[in-house]
Every structure is written in C-alpha cells, then in structure tokens.
Image (tube, rainbow, N blue to C red):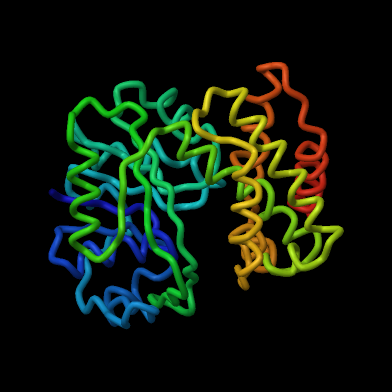
Amino acid sequence: MKYAVIGMGAVGGYYGSRLALAGHDVHFLLRSDYEHVRTHGFEVESVLGDYRLDHPNVFLSSSQMPVCDVVFVAMKTTSNHLLPELLRPILGSDTLVVLLQNGIGVEAELQRQLPNLQIAAGIAFINCVKSGPGRLLHRGYGHVTLADYSCRQPGLLSRVAADFSASGVRAEVADYLHARWKKNILNMATNGMTVVHNCLCDALISNPDTCGEVRALMLEGIRAAQACGASGITDDLADKMLATTATTHFATSMKYDYDHHLPMEVEYIYSRPIQEAESHGLSLPHLRRLEQQLLIMNNH
C-alpha cells in the first residue's frame, strides 16, 4: 500500500519512518524541516536501535504528492482547520485517513467536513520528541492502537496493523469509543496538570495533594466515558493509570507545547469531551475548572 504522513514531527516522523525503513512506500508532508531532510535525510535515535532514512520521499505541498491508500494525520489538532485543503490532493475514492491525534471529536469534525471520507483513529503510546532538524529522540514505548470510525473496507485496518507489526511497531485494532476515551482519560488527568503545576508526570503522583487531584480528574473522565457510551471502562482504570504515571519521568505533550510557546490542544483534549459529557447530563467540575485555567494560559 502507498502511505502518506501529514506532519513529520515526533509522532508522524517515528511511525512513518518505521514503515519506510521496512520498505513501504511512504510520502511525507513537511514544513520547517523540508530542506534539511531533503538534503541530509532523517535520523531517529531510539531505545530500540538508531536508524536513518537517507532519501525519504518529502514534499512541501500535498498538491505535489501522489494519491495514497492510507494517510496518517500526525499534526497537532490546533491545525485541524487546514485538513480538508491538505488532504484533498492525495485522496482517492477509497483512501483511508487515520488521525494519529489526541482528543475526542477529531474524527467527527473531519467527517462533517468531508462526509464521504473513510476515517479511523490512531492512538499512539510513545515517548518521542524532536531533538533537532530532521532528528527524533525515541525514549520509550511506541505501540499504536487503530480503531474504525467510518471505514468501508473490511480488513483494511488489520492490513495497516500488520504492516506496522512487520515494521517493528506493535499494533492492534480495537473498539473506537473504548480506545479514544481510555487514552483521553489519561490525557485529561495529566496533560493540563503538568502545565499548571510545572512538573513532570511522576512528580504529580509523588505529591499526595496533586495525586489526589489527578485521581479526581481520572474518575471524572471515567464517568464521562461511561456516559458517552464507551464500554469496558471502570473505576479500577484510575489505579492502573496512577501506577503507570508514577514511573513516567517525562513531560506531557501539552507541557512540551506550553514550554515551547506553542498552542496547547485544549479543545479536543478538554473542551469537546466535557461538552459531550455535559450533553448527556453529566457535570465535570474538576475538569471544567482545569480547562478554564488552560484556556487562560493558552492566550498568554
């Protein structure tokens, strides 16, 4: 299959480069690093072993790219208003777009804009950052969950998962609502808190006061997931997530954005899921208060 990656940052760069390294036909849309990657290639320093792509297929405009079978969208949701224009040149009648993004509601919004598009969710579990132009530092994890939103082709997601697995990326296909909400419960509880308290994830849990705040946020997120129809999400998920977070000594993606003066993804990680839960009659006071703090910080 022919793949495209929209956004060659940490997430898109890692997963796309893994596929390309394994010999798949992958085409990357870049912005700031285009000239560097075109001239010098793309490097990944990884806990699984370093590697580089000497001559990746890179483009400055999607209008120059071929029509692809599968498109991974890995840019921040703060730029999602650009998606219809970016996607149209590379879409065929059966192209599948996989949103490798955080949050709730991203698929629904894109489907509203492009009603006939096949869409799936991509939920990434990875600790990876850009360490320089055309260079990534992969420090841990790396598996990805794929979930069907509006795919019309039976077995297509399983084929994508198989390509990932053969490329050294652990991949699985899961239920859409369960997968999206499970990841977002963790994001809602930790992302904003690391920004507000200016700390790493493990520091939140080692302090009894902030640990209590994180737990309260997780429980509200679990209630929201249940109200919105996500199956298999129960209260014990909070304890499992707290145990994992206690050993997570790195910044969240939202703290990285805040520290680097980039817009934070408040809308889809907080505002949209809160609105959806409230539409089902559920009040989320802890999450709503944190969302309001982040919206203020996002404007300064």
The x and y percentages for residue 247 are: 61, 69
> In the drawing, does residue 34 fall left or right of residue 238?
left
Residue 30 vertical position relative to residue 237 in the rendered view, above or below: below
Quarter holding the C terminus?
bottom right
The x and y percentages for residue 295 are: 76, 45
Camera-nearest residue between 28 and 212: 212
Residue located 61% across and 53% down the image: 241
Residue 221 vertical position relative to residue 211 in the rendered view, above or below: above
> In the drawing, does residue 147 fall left or right of residue 26?
right
Residue located 36% across and 26% down the image: 114
> In the drawing, does residue 100 fall left or right of residue 29?
right
The x and y percentages for residue 218 are: 69, 44
Camera-nearest residue between 139 and 232: 232
Residue 88 vertical position relative to residue 128 in the rendered view, above or below: above
Residue located 81% across and 52% down the image: 212
Camera-nearest residue between 175 and 151: 175
Q: Which quadrant would residue 60 be assigned to in this image?
A: bottom left
Residue located 63% across and 25% down the image: 276
Q: Check the image and name the residue furthest to the front.
A: 236
The x and y percentages for residue 165 are: 23, 58
Q: Which quadrant would residue 16 be assigned to in this image?
A: bottom left
Q: Which quadrant would residue 269 be assigned to in this image?
A: top right
Q: Check the image and name the residue furthest to the right.
A: 209
